[in-house]
Image (spheres, rainbow, N blue to C red):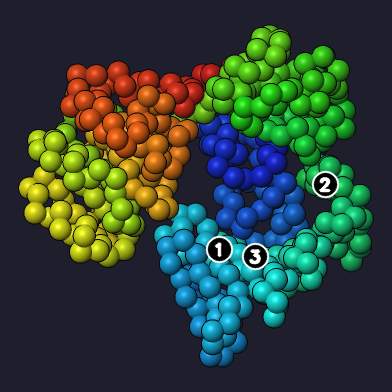
């Protein structure tokens, strides 16, 4: 039996990904498991469902127009999603994997004649349907089946009874919940978690509680935001009644501050953010970046005119409207319609500031990318997309755009403000994680 620390994640959404990356960057080489599978997991992350399904070699994710549809049906798509039509009747909706602008298919919902979702096809990074979700006539979840590369049904989860059925080696196993199913996988792999690092008080917590107690050294990474109370399962840990968990690392500043205000023990509850891999050092080039797929950019004209010595780089994945193209008349504005990924990356590498001042959807995960490339991020209350990486005092009301200008023109404080920006996102170093 392999006795090893294990990272167990409730899902593999953004914050779970960041925790996983922080662990790997810090040298953690133990197994990583997740209770979900969106079809695009890294090779070293194991889903408790699709482990039993195997992996297709040499496959490739499907572009939106490569899904299977009946003859004469039409597929339409934008940079945020797609639709399937039978003449004027919408038959399906396509959801893309991140980053959305690549238009790689993750899920296709299929509608009945009443426009109620009845089936979802789940596509993975190898381009095949690895799971199907069934809904009843009210659009409520019924079950999800997972398939191997030959199309054989391997795992079935019943969302009504919560049972999970596993077809393995000509045998049928029935588990009453996800916790039993996860523990079966540990047995299958002959793994005993000497320490369990986990990020949810739901299934991962119950797995921890059900394991043999070794050294009372499991750790909860709490990733939820501000709330007015202490969750019941967390109180079990705080009261010292957990079988294995002894520490809670809170990954959002406002949540940590509230827990302390509610009387949480500082010896048990500690703040800990993420290890970020910053792509470049601070620089001073007087370049400003804006990423948009809309010509509705708040106060762009006023900013451009007020800062003639700053160079504005406005990029879009699509073609630009005449309204936006008219900014070419300014010497300090450079427009990039239909911008390629390599061009966008170059702009993140050469600019000092990112302005989140465009309406409509955020593109290319721009705020996070700006943060990772050490751009100082500023925005307006009316347009801001993601406050997680932004200093609260650098989000202005659009009517107070002059305050934004003052910050940008105060280049002497750029490095200080970037350090403040990293602190607001609770940036940690590798040693912080090694000490866990």
Q: Disc 1 to disc 2, how far (Cα)? A: 26 Å
**Residue pointed to by mark 3:** 122
Give the percent coordinates (x, y) of residue 122. 65, 65
Looking at marks 2 and 3 on the same chain, the residue that comes earlier in the sequence is marked by: 3
Q: Secondary structure at mark 3?
A: strand
Vertical order, 187 against 250 (above or below) = below
Instruction: Nearest to the eye among marks 1 and 3: give it.
Output: 1
Q: Which residue is mark 2?
A: 178
Q: Earlier in the sequence, mark 1 or mark 3?
A: 1
* Residue 250, placed above or below residue 13: above
Number of other residues with Cα within 10 Å of mark 1, as a class: few under 14, some 14 to 19, many 20 or more:
many
Q: Please report whichever mark, 1 or 2, sits nearer to the chain's N-terminal start.
A: 1
Residue name at image x 59 percent, y 51 percent: 41
Q: Which residue is mark 1?
A: 95
Dot 2 falls on a residue whose secondary structure is: helix
Locate the C terminus and report the quarter of the image it occupies: top right
* Residue 112 or residue 418, whichever sits in front: 112
Do tag 2 and tag 3 residues touch (Cβ < 8 Å)? no
- Which is more toward the observer, 292 or 217? 292
Asked if the residue at tag 3 contacts the one at tag 1, i.e. Cβ–Cβ closer than 8 Å, the answer is no
């Amino acid at each position: 039996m392999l006795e090893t620390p294990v990272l167990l994640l409730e899902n593999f959404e953004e914050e779970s990904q960041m925790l996983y990356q922080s662990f790997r960057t810090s040298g953690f080489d133990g197994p990583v498991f997740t209770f979900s599978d969106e079809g695009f997991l890294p090779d070293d992350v194991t889903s408790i469902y699709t482990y039993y399904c195997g992996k297709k070699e040499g496959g490739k994710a499907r572009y939106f127009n490569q899904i299977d549809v009946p003859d004469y049906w039409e597929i339409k798509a934008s940079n945020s999603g797609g639709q399937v039509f039978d003449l004027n009747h919408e038959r399906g909706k396509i959801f893309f994997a991140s980053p959305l602008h690549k238009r790689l298919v993750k899920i296709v919902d299929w509608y009945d004649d009443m426009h109620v979702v009845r089936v979802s096809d789940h596509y993975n990074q190898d381009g095949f349907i690895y799971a199907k979700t069934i809904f009843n006539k009210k659009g409520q979840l019924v079950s999800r089946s997972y398939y191997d590369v030959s199309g054989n049904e391997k795992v079935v989860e019943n969302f009504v009874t919560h049972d999970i059925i596993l077809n393995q080696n000509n045998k049928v196993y029935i588990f009453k919940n996800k916790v039993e199913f996860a523990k079966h996988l540990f047995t299958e792999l002959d793994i005993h978690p000497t320490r369990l690092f986990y990020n949810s008080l739901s299934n991962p917590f119950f797995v921890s509680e059900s394991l043999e107690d070794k050294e009372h050294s499991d750790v909860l990474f709490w990733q939820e935001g501000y709330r007015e109370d202490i969750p019941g399962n967390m109180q079990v840990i705080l009261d010292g009644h957990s079988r294995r968990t002894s520490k809670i690392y809170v990954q959002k500043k406002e949540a940590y501050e509230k827990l302390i205000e509610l009387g949480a023990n500082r010896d048990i509850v500690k703040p800990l953010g993420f290890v970020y891999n910053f792509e470049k050092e601070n620089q001073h080039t007087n370049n400003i970046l804006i990423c948009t797929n809309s010509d509705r950019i708040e106060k762009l004209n006023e900013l451009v005119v007020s800062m003639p010595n700053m160079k504005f780089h406005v990029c879009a994945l699509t073609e630009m409207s005449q309204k936006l193209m008219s900014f070419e008349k300014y010497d300090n504005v450079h427009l990039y319609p239909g911008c390629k990924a390599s061009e966008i990356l170059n702009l993140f590498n050469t600019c000092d500031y990112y302005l989140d001042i465009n309406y409509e959807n955020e593109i290319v995960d721009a705020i996070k990318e700006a943060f990772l490339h050490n751009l100082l991020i500023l925005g307006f209350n009316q347009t801001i997309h993601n406050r997680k990486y932004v200093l609260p005092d650098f989000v202005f009301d659009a009517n107070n755009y002059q305050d934004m200008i003052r910050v940008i023109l105060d280049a002497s404080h750029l490095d200080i403000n970037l350090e403040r920006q990293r602190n607001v996102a609770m940036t940690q170093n590798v040693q912080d994680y090694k000490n866990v």
